[in-house]
Image (cartoon, rainbow, N blue to C red):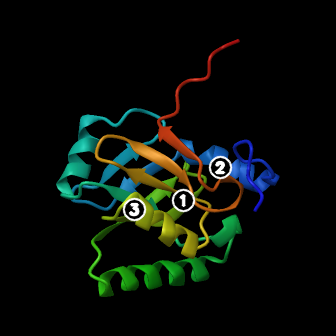
Amino acid sequence: MARRTERGAGADERTAAAWAAYPQTVLELYTEPRARIDLRAEIDETGRRALRSLGWPEMAVLTPANPCGEPRPAAENARRLTGLEQRLADAGIRFVRVDGHAPDGSHCEPCVGIATSREDALALARELEQLALFHWDGASFWLLGAAGPYSGVVERLPQPPVAAG
């Protein structure tokens, strides 16, 4: 079995660009009231209050859309989201709708926030052929590589600022 020696080794340009965009995500939780969590910054009290209101010790945020990072038609992504929501409901797994936005609004993916462990979330993301997911551990969000060249990569969000040099 080949072993990756550096983060993202072998990633094509699209996959590398997708990975670079994940830490820039703004999450919109369909809670009451709705909450926006900008993963580029430490979570403010409003975001923490929204997360606490769910009553979950941890949460994964993932999408069934665009498997393997390949853009799919909107109708297919909508079917995949509906299917995942039905599957979670049938299994009695608590979830909330979440949208993951680019900061400028140029891209949005429909997601779900799921009351689940990191390990179970990674297994589901791999089944859904997703490159990555976000995991809330009760204190911080983490970017977790699920498949492809970033599988196994774990990064705390927000990322530290890049030092000027």
Which residue lies at the image location 57% right of the left edge and 48% below the top edge?
Answer: 22
Under circle 3, the secondary element is strand
Which residue lies at the image location 53% right of the left edge and 81% below the top edge?
Answer: 80
Looking at the picture, how far across and down is residue 163, in whole percent?
62, 17
Which mark's residue is nearer the viewer, 2 or 1?
Answer: 2
In the image, what residue type sits under mark 2?
Trp
| Vertical order, 119 against 143 (above or below) | below
Under circle 1, the secondary element is strand
Q: Badge 3 is on which residue?
A: 98
Which residue lies at the image location 28% right of the left edge and 55% below the top edge?
Answer: 34
Q: Quadrant of the C terminus?
A: top right
Left or right of 81, for residue 56: left
Q: Badge 2 is on which residue?
A: 19
Please report whichever mark, 2 or 3, sits nearer to the chain's N-terminal start. 2
Please report whichever mark, 1 or 3, sits nearer to the chain's N-terminal start. 3
Left or right of 142, for residue 54: left
- Is residue 103 at least partly visible in the picture? no
- Is residue 142 at least partly visible in the picture? yes
Rate crowding at label 3 as few (under 14), some (14 to 19) or many (20 or more) other CA atoms within 10 Å: many
Q: Quadrant of the N terminus?
A: bottom right
Front residue of this view, candidates 30 and 18? 18
Front residue of this view, candidates 84 and 147? 147
Which residue lies at the image location 67% right of the left edge and 75% below the top edge?
Answer: 72
The outermost residue toward the front is: 1
The outermost residue toward the top is: 165
